[in-house]
Image: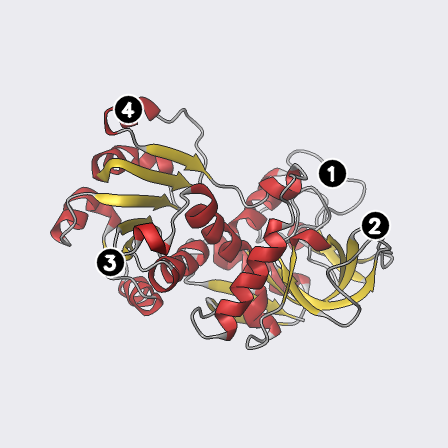
Amino acid sequence: MKAIGFKTSLPITEDESFIEFDTPIPTPQGRDILVKIKAISVNPVDYKIRQNSAKDTVLESPKVIGWDASGTVEAVGEAVTLFKVGDAVYYAGDLTRSGSNTEYQLIDERIVGLKPTKLSDTGAAAMPLTALTAWESLYDRMRISSEKDEGKSILIIGGAGGVGSIAIQLAKKVSGLKVITTASRAETKEWCKAMGADAVVDHKNLIEEVRAAGYQEVDFILDFVDLNGYWDAIVELIKPQGHIASITGSATPIALNKLKNKSATFSWELMYTRSMYQTDDMEEQHRILNKLAALFDDDTLKTTLNTTLKGFTAENLKEAHRLLESGKTIGKVVIEY
């Protein structure tokens, strides 16, 4: 089978930033399924790992990255119970294993869902990583429920990106929250409104903009951009006993003491935690992906696919990374095989 990887971390403009090569099709064992991939999408995690995982070294074998994929089950391990050969599936992968930038991939069935029937392979491939991240942020970390939280407010920092685009939809259409999100360009503002945002504010003057939109403080804040950069504004805007979650990490410590007087809660979210640590509830990602599929199929949610590149080639993978690295993408970039 064909795979695309890299032996050293290079700028995406370099010829060998991605290289095509042949490798044997693997055989599934245990709870693994073998998926024939039909489409993949690219996320910021892809280019960050490409830029940093083989710095100042040349690997013996190319490293294959990539996480989002959709395709068809070709074979199953002896312990598989959730899928059968021929099932159409989608998934976000596992940081600890070889990635989806290949024609066939082994993946643990516990982190795979049945593909939404209403979505094409490209539409489905756009969704797993961002949708799982948004779902876990809202429902596993912040424990939002429509029964107790309908009508409450949420500020989403970074609404036009892949995760923000689906988080807006879930918060608005599934949980009934009032959604404020940040965007600064005309096209990103329109995108956020199309996703369902009630108010779109400029991130450059966050406190003033949120209050001008009619919200003195908000019940929930989700950061998808730069936690330390917005921390003082987040502290100011979160309601007493509110909840903050972030996916962005921080090179320097977060001043959590600033939340003490408000008794506010803070949570990290990493979609890979369950697969990375083989947690007892790892199969929850299978269930979440199936719940999301039902929401796509009943038109509650819509795919955030915005750009499709046709053909599984090193050049298309370079172009996808170039687009993501520009910081100007809206929605998701997908490569169709």
Provide residue 25's location: percent of width, then percent of height.
85, 59
SS at circle 3: strand
Q: As displayed, is residue 281 above or below residue 159?
A: above
Residue at x-position 32% and y-position 69%: 194
Residue at x-position 26% and y-position 51%: 152
In the image, taking residue 225 as reference, residue 181 lies left or right, namely: left
Q: Of 92 and 139, which appears nearest the observer?
A: 139
Residue that label 2 marks: 30
Label 1 or label 2, whichever lies nearer to me, is 2
Determine the CA span between mark 3 and mark 1: 45 Å
Determine the CA span between mark 1 and mark 2: 32 Å
Residue that label 3 marks: 200
Label 4 or label 3, whichever lies nearer to me, is 4
The residue under label 3 is which amino acid type? Val
The residue under label 1 is which amino acid type? Val
In the image, taking residue 308 as reference, residue 239 lies left or right, namely: left
Give the farthest residue toward the top.
257
Of labels 4 and 1, earlier in sequence is 1
Provide residue 292's location: percent of width, then percent of height.
52, 63
Determine the image quadrant of residue 175: bottom left
Of labels 4 and 2, earlier in sequence is 2
Labelled pair 4, 1 in contact (Cβ < 8 Å): no
